[in-house]
Image (cartoon, rainbow, N blue to C red):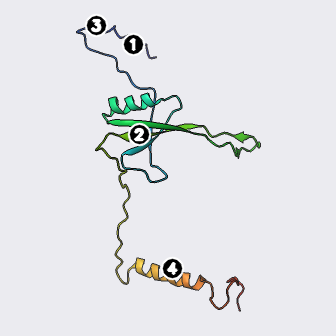
Amino acid sequence: MATRVLYPLYQLGNPQLRIFRTNFFMTLVRPGVPQPEDIVQFRIPMEMTKYDVQNYLQKIYSVPVSAVRMRIQYGSNRKRNHKNQRIKIPDYKVAYVQLAQGHTFQFPDLFPEKAKTVEPGSFDDIQNKLMEDEQDRLKEDPRRPGVSSWFGL
């Protein structure tokens, strides 16, 4: 059974034993539409304000913030459960943080596409040829436009 730890009150000259953690969490989100390089998008709780976001980033992560803009994203309530009752997806806030002049942010490319070089006669080469042949076979006949492929001659 855990007991409650009582820390002594802080007095000048004594070490600070208490650690204060924030009650909020912020999720870095990749924006759906292209934005300038100095704007970063976060999904934050509804209780968080612009000043909370600015202090959070500046004090904890030492990120220079120029401006913070917010909007509320309303969750839809079109979904229904097995009892045909409406299900409301919770609302959330979206914060657009503009970094200070000269600072930019870019998402890292975690899974870069590697250029594949296929050796002739390898398994991948044969598989690609078979897939191309299958696509050619399934292509619509230009002499019979609008007629389904299952309606053969």
Question: Crowding near pointer 4: few (<14 within 10 Å), some, many (20+)?
Answer: few
Q: CA distance from mark 4 to mark 2?
A: 47 Å
Amino acid tagged 3: Gln
- Of labels 4 and 2, earlier in sequence is 2
Q: Residue at x 29, y 15 (%)?
A: 16
Mark 2 Cα-neighbour bin, 10 Å: few <14, some 14–19, many ≥20 = many
Above or below, 20 against 34 in this view is above
Residue 139 lies left or right of residue 29; in this view the side is right
* Front: mark 1 or 3: 3
Q: Where residue 5 is drawn, which disc sits there?
A: 1
Q: Earlier in the sequence, mark 1 or mark 3?
A: 1
- Is 35 left, or right, of 62 in this rendering? right
- The residue that disc 4 covers is 131
Residue topped by disc 2: 97
The Cα–Cα distance between marks 4 and 3, rounded to whole angstroms, is 76 Å
* In this view, the mark in front (4 or 1): 4
State the CA–CA distance, disc 1 to disc 2: 38 Å
Q: Secondary structure at mark 2?
A: strand
Q: Amino acid at mark 2?
A: Val
Q: Amino acid at mark 4?
A: Met
Tell me where residue 61 sits by quadrant.
top left
Label 1 vs label 2, nearer the camera:
2
Q: Quadrant of residue 77?
A: top right
Frontmost of labels 4 and 2 is 2
Q: Earlier in the sequence, mark 3 or mark 2?
A: 3
